[in-house]
Image (tube, grey):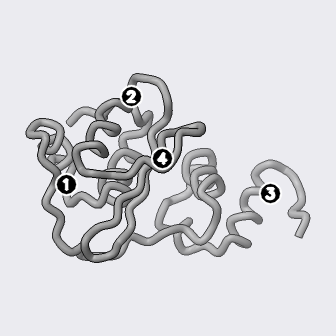
Amino acid sequence: MPVPTKRDVKRFCEIDGWDELSRTDHHRYKKTLNNGEILRTRVSFGSGSAFDDPRLWQRVWRVQLGLESEAEFWETLRTGEPPRRGTPLEKAREPGMPAWLFEYLIHRMGRDENDVLEMSEEQAMELYFEDIGGQNPK
């Protein structure tokens, strides 16, 4: 399946009834599901592909958009009908560190996402400072 454009992701959020929170450096969206779970996502300004890395797109549709399959995303765009969400089988694990650090360890350092999810913020910062050749100013 193709990687969606920024316009596709924004249209999905509109069809699915997401609230647009702000427009700063990105369009930021939030959706509260019937079970109380809160989903959040963001879309960069501009046009073109929304994701350079197909693995990131897989994480976004699964974790941020709360879908069971990528096909649900494309079906929503095709029909104009929101996806039917059941109760999530497993709560998505969130990193215990700032998003920038999580993304740095995975995309810049090539660390395995599951390994990074297991790290504390302190462990992640140590790896970051090792990588940039600096000292952690703890």
Spot occupied by residue 124 in the image (x, y as percentages of width and height): 68, 65
Residues at marks 3 and 1, CA–CA distance in whole angstroms: 37 Å
The residue singled out by tag 4 in the image is: 28
Q: Residue flagged by tag 1: what amino acid is it?
A: Ser
Q: Residue flagged by tag 2: what amino acid is it?
A: Ser
- Give the mark nearer the N terminus: 4 vs 1: 4
Residue 126 position (above or below residue 19) = below
Label 3 neighbourhood size at 10 Å, few (<14), some (14-19), many (20+)? few
The residue singled out by tag 1 in the image is: 69
- Give the mark nearer the N terminus: 2 vs 1: 2
The residue singled out by tag 2 in the image is: 49
**Secondary structure beneath label 1:** loop
Give yes or no for contact between labels 4 and 2 (Cβ–Cβ under 8 Å).
no
For this orientation, the residue located farthest to the left is 79
Which numbered tag is attached to residue 129? Answer: 3
Q: Residue at x 38, y 32 (%)?
A: 6
Residue 57 position (above or below residue 49) = below
- Give the mark nearer the N terminus: 2 vs 3: 2
Q: Residue flagged by tag 4: what amino acid is it?
A: Arg
Residues at marks 3 and 4, CA–CA distance in whole angstroms: 30 Å
Residues at marks 2 and 1, CA–CA distance in whole angstroms: 19 Å
Residues at marks 4 and 1, CA–CA distance in whole angstroms: 22 Å
**Secondary structure beneath label 4:** strand
Label 1 neighbourhood size at 10 Å, few (<14), some (14-19), many (20+)? few
Label 4 neighbourhood size at 10 Å, few (<14), some (14-19), many (20+)? some
- Give the mark nearer the N terminus: 4 vs 2: 4
Q: Quadrant of residue 130?
A: bottom right
